[in-house]
Amino acid sequence: MARRPLSRWLYKWVSGMIILKIIAKILLFPVVAMLTLIQWAGIFLNSISRVILGILAFIFALTGVASLAFGLASGLEAFKMIATGFVIFMVPVMGDWIVSAITVASAILHDFIRS
């Protein structure tokens, strides 16, 4: 029994897709390596900045609360100091979000390369 033309075309198409998938895996390997290095650097820098900026944010917030409690500053000035402390505290949190997005992209590419 002879093959049908549709099945021959489908066989060629699937074998061509396998070759393209292998080529894509080879081309994406350096991208995965680069994303992994960026992830490691981001984790390292974020850890350092979390400590430094956490201390700085605590100082700003404590100064705002203490100056308001002791009557050294008005409510608006104390609010500005507390808000500044909160903004400084949020910088490493945003860094965590960026590192998490890089981690997800790297995991997706790892799964594609391993498939």
Image: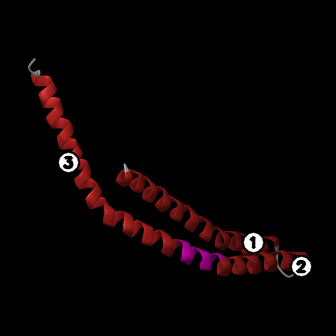
Number of numbered markers: 3
- Image height check: is 70 above or below 110? below
> Is tag 1's residue or tag 2's residue first in the polypeptide sequence?
2
Magenta-span inclusion, residue 33: no
Q: Nearer the viewer, residue 72 or 62?
A: 62
Residue 79, quarter of the rendered image: bottom right
Residue 63, quarter of the rendered image: bottom right
| Kind of residue at badge 3 | Ile
Residue segment shown in magenta: 43-50
Mark 3, residue position: 19
**Left/right of residue 24 with respect to residue 35 in the rendered view:** left
Disc 2 crowd, CA 10 A, few/some/many (<14, 14-19, 20+): few
Determine the residue located farthest toward the right in the rendered image. 70
Mark 1, residue position: 82
Instruction: Give the label, 2 or 3, closer to the camera.
Output: 3
Magenta-span inclusion, residue 46: yes
- Callout 3: SS: helix
- Callout 1: SS: helix
Mark 2, residue position: 71
